[in-house]
Image (cartoon, grey):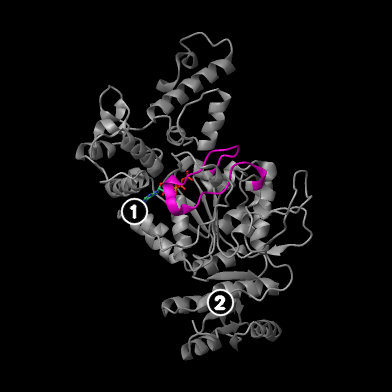
Amino acid sequence: MSADPRLLVVDDEPDLRTLYEMTLLREGFSLDSAGTVEDALELLGARRYDAVITDMRLPDGSGLDILRWLEQQGRSERALVITAYGSAENAVEALKAGAYDYLTKPVDLRQFRMVVASALGRTPKMEGPVPKPFSSAPAAAASSAAPVVAAPDASDAFAPTAPGAFDVLASAQAPKPAPAEARKLPRATPPLTGSTTALERLVGDSAPMRQVRELIEKVARSMAPVLLNGESGTGKELVARAIHDVSARRPQPFIAVNCGAIPEQLLEAEFFGYRKGAFTGASEDREGFFQAAQGGTLFLDEIGDLPLAMQSKLLRALQERSVRPVGAVAEMPVNVRLLSATHKDLAAEVAGGRFRQDLYYRLNVIQIRVPPLRERMEDLAPISARILQRIAADAGVAPVPALTPAALATLSRYSFPGNVRELENLLHRALALSSGDGIDLADLGLPDSVLGLDDAPAETGDVAAEPPLGAALPAEARGDAPLPADLATYLDEVEKQILLRALEQHRNNRTAAGASLGLSLRQMRYRMARLAISVGGDES
Ligand SMILES: Nc1ncnc2c1ncn2[C@@H]1O[C@H](COP(=O)(O)OP(=O)(O)OP(=O)(O)O)[C@@H](O)[C@H]1O
């Protein structure tokens, strides 16, 4: 990019054009302007710009025509589109057509400067309340012993994080106990060290993974919100990190938050921060996740778990691009790219009235489905090899042990309900148990049903079909036995036995056991606590 960025402003209203021009000239940009699509294309044909800012509705066409032209010509200009207030569809259409970002009318000039600066990878000359640089831990770290956002991704799967009062995202991934100081740290991505990027860590050359990788490269170029869909443990967070790593926001923080793990009454303070004295216990100002992610990427995992009241507040923050800390008078502008993930069918949640439709539209501009491991079994060997490499390096084991052909063949018959995370946990244990250079069948500790040693059907993707409903019911429910005297106690006992069986089958891995029963880790924990089931081992 040149030292003196040149922008093209396209709007048919002369007053607005002048306003944009004056604002941008004050920021030190050079400008050209046009009032129609035709004029804009003529200017674009004659020279290159660093960015194009265009109104959506123009006398001889639409801002989308300009976007399409830029796309067809393979031009590098970043495009910003100005849409009418409340027309979320237009904004979504613009982002899908390749716009870097959009603004809604009436244009807030502070936002305008921020968005233009972000498109050009610059810091705007701020007026009014300027967000503080991220210097303190987000609210969660202060309000409990445990962090709520994910651990730094440097060590990826084995980020040392202890489970705490809050169910942390990282806790589901961390087979290792944590040093105490890890709990206090904000979990922004650490400074770049030249280590591998998340995209490089995303192993797998299967057709679905190639497609995911292509999409990552494509969506990284804009500010468009991306919704990642997929079962637990498939790699949604890794994909989110990869989008951040590939984007121009890479030097800025990546903040991952597990929405389902934050108590409802703390959500607003955690997201937007709070001011000293805002409530009992607020002994100092604290930043929230939005401020922590300033300039970078905010990844909201399990977005489907956000209560409706918080959904409205999040939508407002996205629309206004500013947040108001609890107890603060003024709003503060935020420049954050939002990525979100869910294992739920959000469209069904909208239909059921549990998720706001307008927020769904905002988040779901681009959707990436991360396929379950069983749909890309050709990736099993390379992913296992990479994971073993990492575990061995962590444990100081050399040479790196490999799976024997028999172990790999057996693993490929397994359905992996907990996906790559389950594979990681399994290999972690296997490495601890193995005595030689290779990891053999016996080291895997797989249940007999997978090894084909009992009469039960092997737990493979295609045999894992549920039994017919009638056959699965206990005798009491089918009418050939007396009714239970205490239904609640009876059902609790049935549930307990099922949970214990699932836990046994999955070597006490709660995530995998829960996933095999269609339960999230959170739901699994809740049920286990209610039924007083405790298992040893790590928190996954
Ligand atoms: N393709 C892959 N190659 C290598 N490692 C992977 C891959 N996919 C996932 N992983 C690893 O598997 C673990 C689980 O991935 P991740 O946390 O991204 O899953 P998730 O879908 O976000 O899970 P959840 O829905 O439970 O939050 C991580 O340690 C991640 O690094």
Q: Residue furthest bottom?
A: 46
Report the residue at 35% width, 45% height from top: 391
Answer yes or no: is residue 165 visible: yes
Report the residue at 47% width, 66% height from top: 247
The answer to whether residue 451 is magenta is no
Q: Which of 267 and 478 lies nearest the eye of the viewer? A: 267
Q: Position of residue 92 (x, y in %)?
A: 55, 64
Q: Which residue lies furthest to the top in this view?
A: 482
Identity of the amino acid at label 2?
Gly
Q: Number of labelled discs?
A: 2
Q: Name the residue under label 1.
A: 203
The answer to whether residue 167 is magenta is yes
Q: Position of residue 100 (x, y in %)?
A: 53, 71
Vertical placement of residue 305 versus 433, above or below: below
**Element at badge 2?**
helix
Q: Where is residue 130 in the image (x, y as percent from the top left)?
A: 70, 68
10 Å crowding of disc 2: few (<14), some (14-19), many (20+):
many
Answer yes or no: is residue 344 visible: no
10 Å crowding of disc 1: few (<14), some (14-19), many (20+):
many
Report the residue at 56% width, 27% height from top: 529
Q: Which of 452 and 95 lies nearest the eye of the viewer? A: 452
**Element at badge 1?**
loop
- Magenta segment's dominant SS is loop
Segment tinted magenta in the rendering: 142-168
On residue 63, the disc is 2
Q: Marks 2/1: CA distance?
A: 39 Å
